[in-house]
Image (spheres, coloured by chain):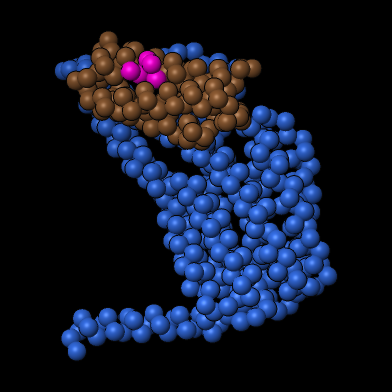
Amino acid sequence: MTQIELIKLIGDVLTKLDVLRGSLLPNEPNRTELDRLRKQLDGLQLKLSKNIFDENTSGFLKATKDLEAVNKELKKTLNKIEKIVTTLETLKRFVTVVDDIVKIALPFL
Amino acid sequence: MTNKLRRTFMNKMLALSLLLATILSVGCGPSGFREPITKFQTSSAVVIASTRLYVTELNQVERDHYVNSQLSKRAQIKLDELEAVQVFSHDGLKARLDALAQLASYGDLLSKLANSDAPERAKSEAKNLGDSLKNLSTTVSGLSGANDTAFKAAVGPVSAIVGEVINFVLQQKIKEALNKAINEGESPINNLIAVIRNDIAVAYERKRNSLSDMRVILVDEYNAEMLKGASADSEKLRVFAERIREHENRWEVFASANPEEGLDAMAKAHSALVTYAKSGQKATNLASLVSAMEDFAARAKIIGQAVQELREI
């Protein structure tokens, strides 16, 4: 996965996540957690956008493979409001993997 | 012959006539490049203008996103956080805009070379482009951002080849200038387009992110008022609903306003031009060149219209 592909993949998740957030009222308990995760993911996408890094290290390649697997899982429930509990759990894992990728790709940040 | 068959026959004859006219209009020397270069230049101008808009707006998108997000949460706005969200430095932004302007000038110069029988007309343009190139080199040499490395490396080779083209023009060697530009400019020009394309991909994604978040902010605004029940202000609800409607229109148009695709088509069209030039401008290679230019022109038109529409919404 290239840097641009990674940024786009995060973008795809963010837009679907926004549809889910926008379908819940702001005071719903799950909504607060979704907002928190969105903010975190947005910050990570920004970091990846502002810096150039090596896309060919073994650490980066492995971590992006992991992300693809979590993303595949996330896609199954992200557009299903009745599966929000599962979505939240998978989304937390997704954000953790992206955070790991940022740490691997941009260790100086 | 039925009307339908007659129409089909006439359409085929018309297409054949147009193809023959195109083939006859191309020959050896600069005049052979005339039509494809003109189409390349006009389509490039549209794509470059759209790309310029994205690059210009990138930092603004980040600032707006931050301010809107803080506003929706009634949270404090901090200047240090506002500065931290900007993707390119002031100089980095300026250098990319200058490079785009010079790609446009370069396309314009090629068009003049292909269309002009009077080399004097192209000379002043070439001189201006040469001066701009020097300024760009100065700006680029000062860039130190982590995301400027690829851009810096791409500008040098383009400056070198365009510099040589300019020298030919100043010596009024138009055919040599055109051949040099087309035969040796492919790799550096396409590489610069690819680097700018990557910057644009980032700009597009960040803008998509911001517009997507804005969808939720606007829906929340409406829902917060709606939750007041009987005491909800109906005028406010109407205004909030209208804002949602406008933003959803913007969101829909935005999907077709990605200049990244235009830059891809531009690089392909540029390569097709080079292939045609290298083949000795044979009429047999004309069909693929015409097809590449048509594809480029069609994409440029869609993107140009979408970007224009976005500005008007």
Left or right of A20? Residue A99 is right
Q: Which chain is brown?
A: A
Q: Position of residue A78 (x, y in %)?
A: 28, 25
Foreground: B158 or B139? Answer: B158
Q: Is residue B285 magenta?
A: no
> How many numbered discs?
0
Foreground: B173 or B243? Answer: B173
Q: Position of residue B211 (x, y in %)?
A: 41, 33
Q: Position of residue A95 (x, y in %)?
A: 42, 18
Residue under the point 25% across and 14% down: A85
Q: Which quadrant is home to the N terminus of chain B?
A: bottom left
Q: Which quadrant is home to the C terminus of chain B?
A: top left
- Residue B137, by quadrant, is top right
Q: Main secondary structure of the magenta part?
A: helix
Residue under the point 54% across and 85% down: B24
Residue under the point 70% across and 69% down: B178
Residue B233's place in the image compared with B46, above or below, is above
Foreground: B64 or B240? Answer: B64
Residue under the point 67% across and 48% down: B99
Quick check: can you spot residue B82? no
Left or right of A34? Residue B167 is right
Residue B254's place in the image compared with A13, above or below, is below
Furthest residue in direction top, as rendered: A29
Left or right of B9? Residue B107 is right
Left or right of B89? Residue B242 is left
Residue A85's place in the image compared with B100, above or below, is above
Q: Position of residue A103 (x, y in %)?
A: 55, 17
Quick check: can you spot residue A8? yes
Region in magenta: A90-94
Shade of chain B as shown in the rendered figure: blue
